[in-house]
Amino acid sequence: MKIRYLHTMVRVKDLDATMDFFRLLGLEETRRWDNDAGRFTLVFMAPPDQPETPVELTYNWDGDDGLPSDSRHFGHLAYEVEDIYALCQHLMDNGVTINRPPRDGRMAFVRSPDNVSVELLQAGAAKAPAEPWASMDNTGHW
Protein backbone atom coordinates (compact mmCIF):
# COMPACT_ATOMS: atom_id res chain seq x y z
CA MET A 1 0.00 0.00 0.00
CA LYS A 2 1.37 3.40 -0.98
CA ILE A 3 0.83 6.62 0.92
CA ARG A 4 1.77 10.19 -0.02
CA TYR A 5 1.80 13.35 2.08
CA LEU A 6 -0.69 15.93 0.80
CA HIS A 7 -0.91 18.84 3.25
CA THR A 8 -1.61 19.97 6.80
CA MET A 9 -4.84 21.96 7.26
CA VAL A 10 -5.33 24.68 9.84
CA ARG A 11 -8.39 26.87 10.33
CA VAL A 12 -7.66 30.59 10.36
CA LYS A 13 -9.65 33.58 11.61
CA ASP A 14 -7.80 36.31 9.68
CA LEU A 15 -6.65 34.99 6.31
CA ASP A 16 -4.56 38.04 5.38
CA ALA A 17 -2.69 38.16 8.72
CA THR A 18 -2.02 34.41 8.60
CA MET A 19 -0.77 34.57 5.01
CA ASP A 20 1.51 37.47 5.98
CA PHE A 21 2.92 35.33 8.83
CA PHE A 22 3.67 32.38 6.54
CA ARG A 23 5.23 34.74 3.97
CA LEU A 24 7.60 35.89 6.72
CA LEU A 25 8.65 32.23 7.01
CA GLY A 26 9.32 32.20 3.25
CA LEU A 27 6.22 30.33 2.07
CA GLU A 28 4.36 31.31 -1.09
CA GLU A 29 0.77 30.86 -2.17
CA THR A 30 0.64 27.88 -4.55
CA ARG A 31 -3.11 27.70 -5.13
CA ARG A 32 -6.42 29.07 -3.89
CA TRP A 33 -10.02 27.97 -4.03
CA ASP A 34 -12.92 30.26 -3.16
CA ASN A 35 -16.11 28.24 -2.65
CA ASP A 36 -19.14 30.54 -2.87
CA ALA A 37 -21.65 27.78 -2.05
CA GLY A 38 -19.73 26.60 1.03
CA ARG A 39 -18.67 30.16 1.93
CA PHE A 40 -15.02 29.30 2.51
CA THR A 41 -11.59 29.90 1.00
CA LEU A 42 -8.73 27.42 0.88
CA VAL A 43 -5.23 28.84 0.40
CA PHE A 44 -2.27 26.50 0.00
CA MET A 45 1.18 27.88 0.89
CA ALA A 46 4.51 26.09 0.58
CA PRO A 47 8.25 26.75 0.42
CA PRO A 48 9.23 27.88 -3.10
CA ASP A 49 11.20 24.70 -3.81
CA GLN A 50 8.63 22.35 -2.22
CA PRO A 51 5.19 23.05 -3.69
CA GLU A 52 4.24 19.45 -2.91
CA THR A 53 4.37 20.09 0.88
CA PRO A 54 1.82 22.83 1.53
CA VAL A 55 -0.04 24.02 4.56
CA GLU A 56 -3.75 24.47 3.76
CA LEU A 57 -5.24 27.60 5.33
CA THR A 58 -9.01 27.19 5.65
CA TYR A 59 -10.93 30.42 6.09
CA ASN A 60 -14.67 30.23 6.75
CA TRP A 61 -16.25 33.47 5.55
CA ASP A 62 -18.87 33.48 8.31
CA GLY A 63 -16.42 32.55 11.08
CA ASP A 64 -16.05 29.28 12.96
CA ASP A 65 -18.49 29.91 15.81
CA GLY A 66 -21.14 27.66 14.28
CA LEU A 67 -18.84 24.67 13.82
CA PRO A 68 -19.24 21.75 16.20
CA SER A 69 -16.50 21.39 18.80
CA ASP A 70 -15.13 17.90 18.35
CA SER A 71 -12.02 18.34 20.54
CA ARG A 72 -9.62 17.74 17.67
CA HIS A 73 -6.12 18.81 18.62
CA PHE A 74 -3.23 20.01 16.51
CA GLY A 75 0.45 19.68 17.39
CA HIS A 76 2.59 21.89 15.16
CA LEU A 77 3.95 22.50 11.69
CA ALA A 78 7.70 21.94 11.30
CA TYR A 79 10.03 23.62 8.83
CA GLU A 80 13.76 23.15 8.33
CA VAL A 81 15.48 26.53 7.93
CA GLU A 82 18.84 27.62 6.51
CA ASP A 83 19.75 30.01 9.35
CA ILE A 84 17.61 29.78 12.47
CA TYR A 85 19.10 32.89 14.05
CA ALA A 86 18.52 35.05 10.97
CA LEU A 87 14.94 33.83 10.53
CA CYS A 88 14.09 34.34 14.21
CA GLN A 89 15.50 37.88 14.04
CA HIS A 90 13.48 38.53 10.87
CA LEU A 91 10.32 37.29 12.59
CA MET A 92 10.99 39.40 15.71
CA ASP A 93 11.66 42.46 13.55
CA ASN A 94 8.18 41.92 12.09
CA GLY A 95 6.40 41.62 15.43
CA VAL A 96 6.35 37.84 15.84
CA THR A 97 6.96 36.53 19.37
CA ILE A 98 9.62 33.83 19.61
CA ASN A 99 7.92 31.50 22.11
CA ARG A 100 10.84 29.09 22.41
CA PRO A 101 14.05 30.83 21.34
CA PRO A 102 16.80 28.84 19.57
CA ARG A 103 19.03 28.74 22.66
CA ASP A 104 20.59 25.50 21.43
CA GLY A 105 21.14 26.80 17.88
CA ARG A 106 18.86 24.03 16.67
CA MET A 107 15.18 24.57 17.47
CA ALA A 108 12.71 27.40 17.96
CA PHE A 109 8.92 27.69 18.18
CA VAL A 110 6.64 30.54 17.14
CA ARG A 111 2.88 30.86 16.75
CA SER A 112 0.80 32.12 13.86
CA PRO A 113 -1.91 34.76 14.34
CA ASP A 114 -4.33 31.85 14.85
CA ASN A 115 -2.15 30.32 17.58
CA VAL A 116 -0.82 27.52 15.37
CA SER A 117 2.51 26.30 16.74
CA VAL A 118 5.34 26.31 14.18
CA GLU A 119 8.63 24.52 14.88
CA LEU A 120 11.74 25.85 13.18
CA LEU A 121 14.70 23.45 12.92
CA GLN A 122 18.21 24.43 11.84
CA ALA A 123 19.29 22.53 8.73
CA GLY A 124 22.33 20.33 9.33
CA ALA A 125 24.28 20.71 12.55
CA ALA A 126 23.14 23.07 15.27
CA LYS A 127 24.63 26.56 15.22
CA ALA A 128 26.90 27.53 18.11
CA PRO A 129 24.91 29.11 20.97
CA ALA A 130 24.81 32.89 20.54
CA GLU A 131 23.20 35.93 22.10
CA PRO A 132 20.56 37.16 22.41
CA TRP A 133 19.14 33.68 21.93
CA ALA A 134 21.27 31.77 24.46
CA SER A 135 19.92 33.71 27.44
CA MET A 136 16.39 34.43 26.15
CA ASP A 137 13.53 32.93 28.17
CA ASN A 138 10.50 31.15 26.76
CA THR A 139 7.42 33.31 26.21
CA GLY A 140 3.98 31.76 26.57
CA HIS A 141 3.30 28.27 25.27
CA TRP A 142 4.83 26.60 22.27
Image (cartoon, helix red, strand yellow):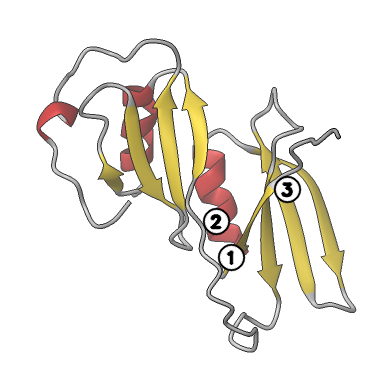
Decide which of tag 3 and tag 1 comes sooner along the chain. Answer: 1
Q: Nearer the viewer, residue 3 or 101?
A: 3
Element class at badge 1? strand
Q: Position of residue 21 (x, y in %)?
A: 50, 48
Up-down relation of residue 30 to residue 112 (above or below)? above
Nearer to us of marks 2 and 1 is: 1
The local crowd at label 3, few if under 14, some if 14 to 19, many if 20 or more residues have their Cα within 10 Å, is many
Residue at image mark 1: 12
Does label 2 or label 1 sit earlier along the sequence? 1
The residue nearer to you, when weighing 73 against 2, is 2
x 84%, y 58%: residue: 33
Toward which corner of the image does residue 141 lie, by quadrant?
A: bottom left
Mark 1 residue type: Val
Could you tell me residue 2's position as x and y percent? 84, 33
Where residue 126 sits, quadrant-wise, is top left
Q: Could you tell me which residue is drawn at 35 percent across and 42 percent down?
A: 109
Q: Which residue is mark 2?
A: 18
Look at mark 3 in the image and give the residue it sits on.
Answer: 44
| Residue 74 image point, x, y percent | 51, 58
Mark 2 nearby-residue class (10 Å; few <14, some 14–19, many ≥20): some
Residue type marked 3: Phe
| 94 is higher (above) or lower (below) than 72 | above
Q: CA distance from mark 2 to mark 3?
A: 12 Å
Distance from disc 3 to disc 1, alpha carbons, whole Å, reads 12 Å
Outermost residue toward the left? 135
